[in-house]
Amino acid sequence: MSPRTAAQPGAPARADGFEIHRTPAALAPYEQGWRDLVAAVPGSSYFTTPDWVLGTWEAMDPAAAAAAEVALWTGPDGRPEAVVPLARTRGRLHPRIPLPVRFWTLLGADADGADHGLLPVALHRREEVRAWLRRRTRGSSLWLPAMDPEGDTALLPAGSRRIARTTCPRLEIGTGVAVGSASFRRLMRRRERQLAEAGIAFRWVGPQDMTAELLDAVLALHRLRQDHRGAVTALGPHRRPLHLRLQARADADHGPAALVAEREGTPVGAVYGFLWQDTFAYYNGGWDPAYARLSLGTVLLDRTIAEATALGARTFDFLRGDESYKYDSFGAADRFDEQWLRPRSAGALVAGAVLRHARRRHGGP
């Protein structure tokens, strides 16, 4: 498959216009140009926009933030032509591998963070970026936990290998596209009537209308659902600063959005995600378990798909996780992010071998 890069004229590469920025504030003048560069990549993800990357950086603790940087190549007009956000950190390459490793990675691509990573690079900047990335990470391990399989992996330094995959189901949507089976659609209409009789109303909240209060409601509902299931929540209070920064950068057509279920004005359920281009990415959500018998969670997702369709979305991205409801109820199809590693330490070599073995054991390519 051909690499996806920003659609730029094939002009000769230029050495001018290169800078490394070590604070998020220094990149403020380039944010819209960066956003436009990402938008020019077909099928690009919200997780590669300055909204997510800089929001993550701003929300880091000072020690971690000091180990991050963004390499930026600009053209004669000052607009970004390539962006490489990096962070140097230390941690586990998998929760079940206790050995910590020091490595470079994409800024914002932590374990419970971004999916569909890629490097937004104009065609005529590819060789410069590839050479710079090789030099910058020389001597250190490079770990990219969730790379878009259609991204330009030829930009990665020699020795980088795909070691694992993560399931990220997607659903193609659009006007006239039926979601789920006929019996599933009948069930959803019946459940909607029952929820209405119980006093539940639904409200779409677009990116420009998201507030801190609504985010707090989403966090509380998510925690309520996770407590009921006895699971550990990833969307906890520690993520709040990031999501407030995402709200601050939102516009009418991109950023955090939610479908909220309310009873007498009080939220009892929510689906929370991100609008970007023609995709709605379902990040997380929660609902009061008291309404489980009325399938509130499933109805919320079904209504969110309908709202996203009405806004012109063509893809509903369930993001990582192969939970059965994504397939059985909604008919999602598998898609996979790829994990890449260039090991430069004994710990990274061991972790890479374990992950490759696990992939082969489970039938991965």
Image (cartoon, grey):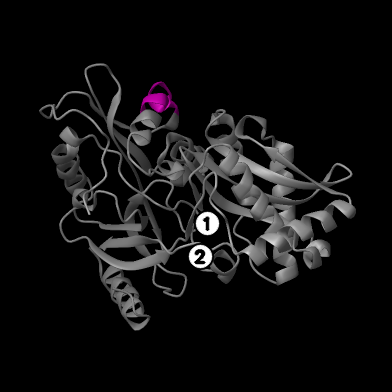
Q: Residue at x 74, y 54 (%)?
A: 221
Chief secondary structure of the magenta portion = helix
Query: Height in image: 327 above or below 222?
Result: below
SS for callout 2 = loop
Residue farthest to the top? Answer: 77
Q: Name the residue nearer the viewer: 333 or 52.
A: 333
Query: Height in image: 87 above or below 23?
Result: below
**Quarter in which the C terminus is drawn:** bottom left
Q: Which residue is mark 2?
A: 321
**Quarter in which the N terminus is drawn:** bottom left
Whether residue 292 sits left or right of residue 357 in the image: it is right
Tell me if label 2 and label 1 are in contact, CB under 8 Å.
Answer: yes
Q: Position of residue 37 (x, y in %)?
A: 33, 31
Residue 72 shown in magenta = no
Q: Residue at x 40, y 52 (%)?
A: 116
**Residue 318: assigned label:** 1
Q: CA distance from mark 2 to mark 1?
A: 8 Å
Q: Residue at x 30, y 43 (%)?
A: 119
Count residues near mark 2 (Cα–Cα under 10 Å), then give few for <14, some for 14-19, many for 20+: few
Q: Of the residues shown, which amino acid type is indicated by label 1? A: Phe
Whether residue 187 sits left or right of residue 344 in the image: it is right
Magenta range is 25-33
Q: Name the residue nearer the viewer: 246 or 143.
A: 246
